[in-house]
């Protein structure tokens, strides 16, 4: 009986643990403006925090990038989605990882908590300067 109860508690805790994800530090953040495969248009969306975190590779309002054929796309709930569903994500903040050739090989659609964390990090950076 105790084993069953422990298993039930563990099973209930798994979704909460899986809900929190950590973005790799080598990802760039931007706003997914347009998807016209095999290219996507990324921009800063007028947010200074997006421009700062993209380390300057987004000059102006937008830039086009080629998406790798083997791209991995994660939605806000950390589930992999097929590339055909990417156009529906336009207008959302994303984190991207590029390969040596500059092609996007990984896209993470950011959830609200991650977006707020990046905004907070930006404010902290600006006050530290």
Image (cartoon, rainbow, N blue to C red):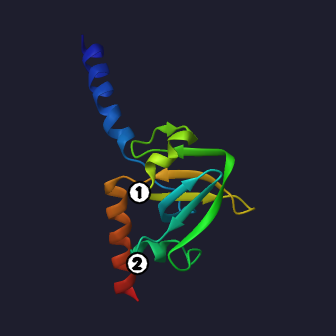
User: How far across and down, in percent of the image, does residue 8 sit?
Assistant: 28, 20
Q: Residue at x 55, y 58 (%)?
A: 96
Question: Which residue in the structure is indicated by mark 2?
Answer: 48
Question: Which residue in the structure is indicated by mark 1?
Answer: 92
Q: Is residue 109 left or right of residue 101?
A: left
User: How far across and down, in percent of the image, does residue 56 sit?
Assistant: 56, 78
Compute the Cα span from label 1 to label 2: 15 Å
> From this viewpoint, which residue is outermost toward the right?
101
The image shows residue 122, relative to residue 5, as above or below, that is below
The image shows residue 17, relative to residue 104, as above or below, that is above
Q: Is residue 99 left or right of residue 92?
A: right
Mark 1 or 2 closer to N-term?
Answer: 2
Q: Secondary structure at mark 2?
A: helix
Q: Secondary structure at mark 1?
A: loop
What is the quadrant of residue 125 in the picture?
bottom left
The one nearer the camera, 85 or 26, is: 85
Q: Estimate how packed mark 2 is, as few (under 14), some (14 to 19) or many (20 or more) residues with alpha carbons within 10 Å.
A: few
Q: Is residue 38 left or right of residue 129?
A: right
């Amino acid at each position: 009986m105790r084993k069953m109860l422990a298993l039930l508690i563990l099973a209930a805790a798994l979704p909460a643990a899986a809900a929190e994800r950590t973005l790799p530090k080598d990802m760039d953040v931007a706003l997914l403006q347009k998807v016209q495969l095999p290219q996507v248009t990324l921009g800063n969306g007028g947010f200074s925090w997006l421009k700062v975190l993209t380390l300057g590779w987004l000059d102006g309002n937008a830039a086009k990038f080629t998406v790798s054929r083997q791209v991995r796309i994660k939605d806000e709930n950390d589930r992999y989605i097929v590339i055909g569903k990417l156009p529906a994500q336009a207008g959302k903040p994303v984190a991207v990882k590029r390969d040596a050739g500059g092609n996007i090989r990984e896209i993470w659609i950011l959830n609200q908590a991650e977006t707020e964390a990046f905004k907070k990090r930006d404010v902290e950076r600006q006050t530290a300067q």
